[in-house]
Image (cartoon, rainbow, N blue to C red):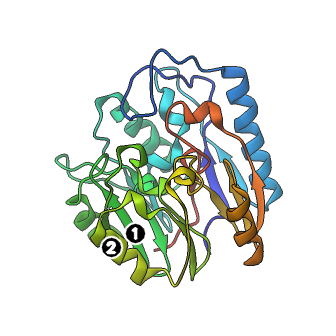
Amino acid sequence: MWGRRYVMCPPEHFDVLYEINPWMHRNVKVDLERAREQWEGLVDALRAAGAVVEVMEPHPDLPDLVFTANAGIVNGNQFVASRFRHPERQAEVPYDIEWFEKHEFVVDTLPDDVSFEGAGDALPFGRVLLAGYRFRSDAGSHVYVSKLTGAAVRSVELVDARLYHLDLTFCPLDDRRAIIAPDGWDPYGRKVVAALVPEPLVLELDDALRFCANSVVVGTNVIMPSCPPAVGRRLEAWGFDVAVAPVDEFLKAGGGCRCLTLALDVVL
């Protein structure tokens, strides 16, 4: 399983300066000191679980650079850069590409006329790349992603604007199990995931809106922004160890634990 090496970006310039998802409100103030503490707590939890964390330097003009999951997707030494739909985030792309080129990745880009937001909307499960579309990514981008990576892509339409990225509704645990939030998908998408995941841990909508699916898995360790008792019991029964890393400052911008990380060891 992938998930033992990540790139993260410190929240030195993190703020809510614009509104591009239902969680963002410019009148909500970010406690930057608390955000730093929470980010460092997540890094500590990942390293304690056995992960390697590499750090991308923050940029004063890019407050959402902290959400590295959206930078693109990794396939071995290949990096496919995102095409952000919202102009507020498009300036992140050259900075992301520069980082990956410096770290000896081969960078590929998508056509200008599609939108695709990286691992926020595309996560591998077994030999398939499950990819979400509607709010931040186009279904049309999935064809190009498949051609570039050689991965078999299964598309899922997202239907709840609060669950605007796939990684708010889907968290792979191993080759048979995943945390899922079916309320975030259309009926066909639910069938796609039902056929893909033999043993799902199904979240109620309230738990999905607490970003329980936006968790990071390192081997048998699951690092979550919050963990309802029933979810924790199910994970522990499956042999997983749960660690809670609160990231409520980042929830103000619509991001959780998974949003703050990009796995560098994925091979599709």
- Three-letter residue code for mark 2: Arg
Residue at screen point 53% across, 59% down: 204
Q: Mark 1 points at which residue?
A: 130
Which disc is residue 154 wearing?
Answer: 2
Quarter in which the C terminus is drawn: bottom left
Using the rendered image of the protein, determine whether residue 151 is visible from the camera's viewpoint.
Answer: no
Q: Is residue 2 shown left or right of residue 96?
A: right
Q: Are discs 1 and 2 less than 8 Å apart at CB? A: yes
- Is residue 66 at all visible to an observer of this figure? yes
Label 2, residues with CA under 10 Å away: few <14, some 14-19, many ≥20: some
The kind of secondary structure element at disc 2 is strand
**Residue 219: % across, % down:** 72, 71
Mark with earlier residue (1, 2): 1
Task: In the rendered view, tell whether residue 203 sits above or below residue 267.
Answer: above
Q: Which mark is residue 193?
A: none
x and y, in percent, of residue 99 in the image: 51, 43
Residue 233 point in image, percent of width and height: 75, 68
**Apparent side of residue 73 relative to residue 11 in the rendered image (left or right):** left
